[in-house]
Amino acid sequence: MNNSLGNDPNAPSRENPEPKPRQDPPEGNRREKRAKKRKETKTAITVSCLNINDFSFQGSGNSIQNSKWSHINQLLRQTRTGILVVSEVHLTERRRDDLKNLFGPRIKINFTADPDNPTGAGGVAIVINKQLTLWHHIESKVAVPGRAMLIKTRWYGDKDIIVLGIYALNVSASDARESTEFYKTLKQFFSRPENRRWWPDYMGGDTNFTEDLINRLPMRAEKAEVLAAFDDLKEMLGLQDGWRSTYPDAKHFTYMGKKKTIDPETGVESILTYQSRLDRIYVTDKLFQHARQWKIAPVGISGVDHEMVSIQVAHEEAPILGRDKWSCPNSILKDQKFAAGTKELGLKAQEEIETIKAEGRTPTRNPQRTYGRFISEAMSLVRKRQLTVRSQAQLKESRLSKEIEKISSDTEIPQLQRSERLANLKAELKTLKKTEHDTERKFVAAKNRLEGETVSKYYFCTNKESKPRDTIDALEIPEPPISQGEPPASVQNTVPELTVESEPPLNPQP
């Protein structure tokens, strides 16, 4: 790949980086040393980006209790996000310390503030979920104060992942100088020899411009100078827009806004609704091969006018994980109709077992087969009830998501009309998300009120560090070659059938 600094083979590029020496942080106390040695991370990690549009809710003051960070903490827990890039955070050292006192056991916050107006402009934070990452090994570096920062954290084994979080300056229809200068400054930062070991595997955040016409509704082109500066940065770092590469024709947007317009002929004032995909994730070609679950989804936090974008990335050396063990959801266990149906199946199985005891067992009619049939029928009942007891909110959310996807791709609808209809549907979907988000908060608050100060499992688990489960590696047994005329090994009967002679006698019960 040609790099953007010329044809010099010694110039920096993704294929020709300098060695990246590892500099671990200084050792802590014995407890931290044991944690570093023992803790393992997930082989796949979810990395997300979200613009939260200020530290606190509008009109609620600037206290920690009124901030959006308790909602960020809940969002990390619910979405199982390992690393979250947060834009427009308006953080200071004092605010970060207050947040650490509240959420220190769960999250770690690295941030860069605007040097001129830290509580009123810009600000980027990279939030680490301590339950899912090896947070003891984190290093951070500021690339552009208040606008771009990097973190390096241990990912899988002794491998690192480098994340670049950005919040670019606005690009207007007439001026793109500040944004252009920002991307040129980033390129100069990564061109320095001492920063080559910080070249990111992942770049995400609010770019405040779009690369293609398809990323705006109504469509309009961006300024050529900002596109050129951003392309130079991407080319040097070897990054690509993974969502667009995965969905080349899809039309999804992360931001919706309104502005006043005046018809030049009639002088009539109107409100224009527009959509744009400002929040994007860029990854290296190598990381893209192991990335999945590219998502754009609204969050239920008031005052957040951007949608969250996320991906799940797995390390190339990570083992292949099989399907998890199936379990019945807790919501179904509390369902009365399921309980009644399971009781009926259990009584029927119990009667059949009593009959077998009285009449004698056979290879095809015995308690083991009866019990296995009961388990299969109970699992089938669980799955049927799952489809039936889905809440009206979930059904409505699914319907709205499908309608949004359908209208976004319908080019027969005029662009202005399509944008207005999308805005109404997204507002309805966001209301559902907010209701779901607030309901979860009330449930957690009620549980904490009841059990938070009692000697209970909840109390001890709340104040204890949660460690990810270790992955136990094993060699995969290859399937033998299939000879002509023989069925595959997966359909061959490898378990001998039971015969009457091999059946042990049934001991009479006293």
Image (tube, rainbow, N blue to C red):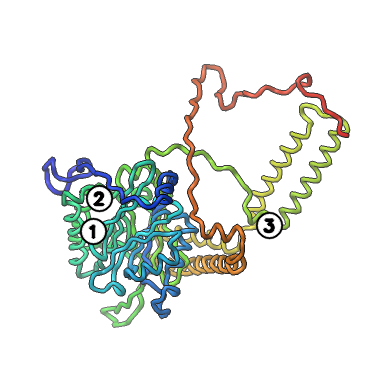
Badges 3 and 1: C-beta atoms under 8 Å apart? no
Say which label, 2 or 1, has the lower sequence index.
1
What kind of residue is marked 3? Lys
Q: How far apart are marks 3 and 1 (CA)?
A: 52 Å
**Is residue 282 in view from this perspective?**
no
Q: Can you tell which mark lies on residue 475?
A: none
Q: In which quarter of the image is the N terminus?
A: top left
What kind of residue is marked 1? Ala
* Residue 328 or residue 444, whichever sits in front: 444
The percent coordinates of residue 233 (x first, y second) are: 21, 53
* Residue 114 or residue 450, whichever sits in front: 450
Name the residue: 48% across, 29% down. Answer: 476
Q: Distance between the residues labelled 2 and 3?
A: 51 Å
The percent coordinates of residue 230 (x first, y second) are: 22, 56
**Is residue 327 in view from this perspective?**
yes
Q: For the residue labelled by badge 1, is the local secondary structure a helix, a strand or a loop?
A: strand
Q: In this view, does 406 lie above or below 430?
A: above
Which residue was labeled with disc 1? Answer: 143
Badges 2 and 1: C-beta atoms under 8 Å apart? yes
Which residue was labeled with disc 3? Answer: 334
Name the residue: 56% across, 19% down. Answer: 486
Q: How far apart are marks 2 and 1 (CA)?
A: 10 Å
Say which label, 3 or 1, has the lower sequence index.
1
- Neighbourhood count class around disc 1 (C-alpha, 10 Å): few under 14, some 14–19, many 20 upward: many
Q: For the residue labelled by badge 3, is the local secondary structure a helix, a strand or a loop?
A: loop
Which quadrant of the figure has residue 348? top right
Q: In which quarter of the image is the C terminus?
A: top right
In this view, the residue farthest toward the bottom is 267
The percent coordinates of residue 273 (x first, y second) are: 37, 71
Q: Is residue 451 above or below residue 337?
A: below
The percent coordinates of residue 147 (x first, y second) are: 26, 64
Q: Is residue 319 above or below residue 499?
A: below
